[in-house]
């Protein structure tokens, strides 16, 4: 699509965000419809992470060239040394070079004549009579009938329009280590490390890579979108020194680059409004406990694009015309994500003894069941049981609060008696 020199760019559909979700939505629209598409992003695939994801989904979207490593096993390990390990048929888990995968999709998208890219930052958003006006950092503007917000943690449309943000965030910090002497029994094993208050309540990872490399890191879970740089870095450095046996593996290794970022967790209430769709991290669609965002970004970007094409062809870009996207997503994921969000605070606060008990439960799963649990990591509890757990926890907080107040009052009275003697 031709971009004029006037710095006013009309189009049918504007996409804010050049990550996996936005690029996938754009590809579906460009390949299936006649709508003109403008992608607004200053840096395509700016997240330089290497996330764990599923081989079959990577193959579905033709991203095999961006695979860094493949895994035949998955393990969950606690700080106390407890571990559950399951081996799979083949290598169903892979680590993906996120930036490379985005570039693959982008190069494919560039082949369509209806597509254009503006390497600028979206700054402002205003509602028009029919559509949206997106203000750009250089003073230009994009005018579109439909806006797809795939801006990730920037939450472009939500912050501009005052919508609620996702309730939780996983902030990860890790590094790639070179010249690692990875033990033979750890090769080909994608490892999750359980959370703890010293290293990171969101848990960590250890992924052996090719050429004697390994990726190691930890995450902090908070209710704020701000990246807690100091806490993440300190927890990571303690883990490098203390989380055995990986501390020994990395002691003589060379640090080759940091990977850090934040993943919103917990879906926003409205995925579609009049002329607006939210997808990927901008919509809080990463899996709620394992915090895996690649597969949800690709699959939901595809769904978003498909519904956008149908709505554009019908000429109905209202909320009702776009609502199939929201209905389909919540039908597939809503109940599980809701339960996970409800239990989030309890999950963050669980002690290491509770994690050891979780290992006992996971040890009963077969390889395929473990893989399924990793992919759809939402609670199996019923809603009544979850409400019961929350009430029990709240009553416990009340009991502890009353007890502490009584102790303070008793101590004050005791001091007054002592002073009166």
Image (spheres, grey):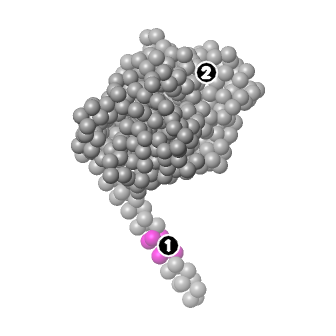
| Magenta stretch encompasses residue 406 | yes
- Indicate the secondary structure of the residue bearing disc 1: helix
Kindly identify which residue carries mark 1.
Answer: 408
N-term mark: 1 or 2: 2
- 82 or 166: nearer the eye? 166
Front tag of 1 and 2: 2
Start-end of magenta stretch? 405-411
Q: Which mark is residue 214?
A: none
Q: Secondary structure at mark 2?
A: strand
Q: Measure how far apart labels 1 and 2 are at the Cα level.
A: 52 Å
Q: Residue at x 31, y 54 (%)?
A: 391
Magenta-drawn stretch contains 309: no
Quadrant (top left/top right/bottom left/bottom right) for the C terminus: bottom right
Residue found 39% across the figure and 42% down from its top: 144
The image quarter in which residue 310 lies: top left
Q: Which residue is mark 2?
A: 208
């Amino acid at each position: 699509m031709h971009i004029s020199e006037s710095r006013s760019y009309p189009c049918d559909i504007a996409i804010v965000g050049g990550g996996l979700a936005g690029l996938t939505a754009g590809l579906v629209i460009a390949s299936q419809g006649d709508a003109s598409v403008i992608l607004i992003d200053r840096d395509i695939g700016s997240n330089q992470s290497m996330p764990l994801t599923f081989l079959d989904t990577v193959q579905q979207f033709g991203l095999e060239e961006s695979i860094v490593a493949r895994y035949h096993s998955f393990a969950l390990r606690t700080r106390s040394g407890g571990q559950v390990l399951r081996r799979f048929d083949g290598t169903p888990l892979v680590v993906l070079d996120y930036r490379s995968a985005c570039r693959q999709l982008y190069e494919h998208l560039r082949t369509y004549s209806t597509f254009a890219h503006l390497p600028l930052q979206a700054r402002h958003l205003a509602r028009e009579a029919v559509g949206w006006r997106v203000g750009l950092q250089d003073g230009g503007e994009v005018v579109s009938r439909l806006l797809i917000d795939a801006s990730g943690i920037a939450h472009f449309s939500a912050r501009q329009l005052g919508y609620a943000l996702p309730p939780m965030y996983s902030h990860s910090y890790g590094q790639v280590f070179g010249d690692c002497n990875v033990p033979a029994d750890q090769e080909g094993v994608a490892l999750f490390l359980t959370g703890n208050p010293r290293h990171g309540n969101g848990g960590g990872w250890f992924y052996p890579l090719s050429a004697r490399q390994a990726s190691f890191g930890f995450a902090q879970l908070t209710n704020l979108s701000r990246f807690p740089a100091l806490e993440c870095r300190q927890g990571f450095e303690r883990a490098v020194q203390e989380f055995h046996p990986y501390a020994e593996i990395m002691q003589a290794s060379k640090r080759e680059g940091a990977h850090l970022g934040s993943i919103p967790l917990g879906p926003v209430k409205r995925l579609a409004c009049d002329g607006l769709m939210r997808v990927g991290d901008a919509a809080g669609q990463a899996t709620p406990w394992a915090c895996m965002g690649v597969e949800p970004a690709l699959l939901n970007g595809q769904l978003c694009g498909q519904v956008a094409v149908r709505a554009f062809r019908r000429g109905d870009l209202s909320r009702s015309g776009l609502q199939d996207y929201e209905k389909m997503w919540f039908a597939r994921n809503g109940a599980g994500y809701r339960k996970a969000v409800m239990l989030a605070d309890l999950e963050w606060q669980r002690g290491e003894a509770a994690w050891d008990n979780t290992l006992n439960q996971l040890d009963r799963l077969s390889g395929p069941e473990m893989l399924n649990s990793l992919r759809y990591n939402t609670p199996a509890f019923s809603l009544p049981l979850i409400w019961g757990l929350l009430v029990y926890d709240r009553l416990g907080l009340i009991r502890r609060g009353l007890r502490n107040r009584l102790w303070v009052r008793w101590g004050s009275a005791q001091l007054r008696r002592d002073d009166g003697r």
